[in-house]
Amino acid sequence: LLERSNGETLFAMREIEGATSFESFAAQHAVHLPTEERRTLVDELASFVARVHERGGHHDDLSAKNLLLRRAGSSFELYLVDLEDFRLGAAPSDEQLVRALGQLNDVPPRAFSLRERLRFWCGYRRARRLKMEWSAERALLARIDAMTRARVERREGRWRAEGRSGFEAGYFPAGTRG
């Protein structure tokens, strides 16, 4: 943490060699991973996010671009970036949880199947030891899905206004159809 004489505060961190954004990895590589590696990645991501939340951490922009990923043998290491949006205190409220998981769910649609997205939720719920009635869980998942869909609609509206497609913007992996 650095503070300038004008009162501005800067946060500096070291480069994480070999790491790439989860957003980029999901768009370009996740679809090509063998099934077991995909499961490992989903499980480790769920566990990582749950640990952050369980310890009272909350990132105001938990989008795939703010997570770095690095292969570590047969597993993956995950890192949070854009830490000026990170808060430490209590576990996220329901609204913060919906926003965070909705942001994280907004990865290229071909990168992870519905089954893998549900696997993430089950792993997250298990790691946080969340207990809820099925109707409450279903309502929460519907709110997360609505948050993701709203993000996608806003982004696609910007792309249309710019005359671009998801393929041109690099959102879909090569060789897939949107």
Image (tube, grey):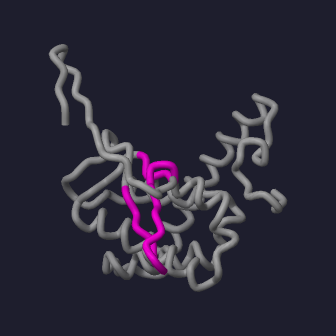
Q: In the displayed image of the protein, which residue is found farthest to the top?
A: 6
Residue 175 in the image, given as x and y percentages of width and height: 82, 61
Locate residue 56 relative to residue 171 in the image: left or right. Answer: left
Residue 39 in the image, given as x and y percentages of width and height: 55, 81
User: Quadrant location of the C terminus?
Assistant: bottom right
Q: In the displayed image of the protein, which residue is found farthest to the bottom?
A: 36
For the point 56% across and 65% down, the residue is 142
Q: Which residues are magenta?
A: 61-79
Locate residue 166 relative to residue 134 in the image: left or right. Answer: right
Q: Nearer the viewer, residue 124 or 36?
A: 36
78 drawn magenta: yes
For the point 28% across and 38% down, the residue is 12
Q: Eyeballing the image, is 175 above or below 60?
A: below
Locate residue 107 relative to residue 135 in the image: left or right. Answer: right
**How many marks on residues?**
0
Q: Nearer the viewer, residue 19 or 146?
A: 19
141 drawn magenta: no
For the point 38% across and 65% down, the residue is 49
Q: Eyeballing the image, is 156 above or below 52?
A: above
Residue 160 in the image, given as x and y percentages of width and height: 78, 35
Q: Eyeballing the image, is 157 above or below 79?
A: above
User: Quadrant location of the N terminus?
Assistant: top left
Residue 38 in the image, given as x and y percentages of width and height: 58, 77
For the point 34% across and 42% down, the residue is 85
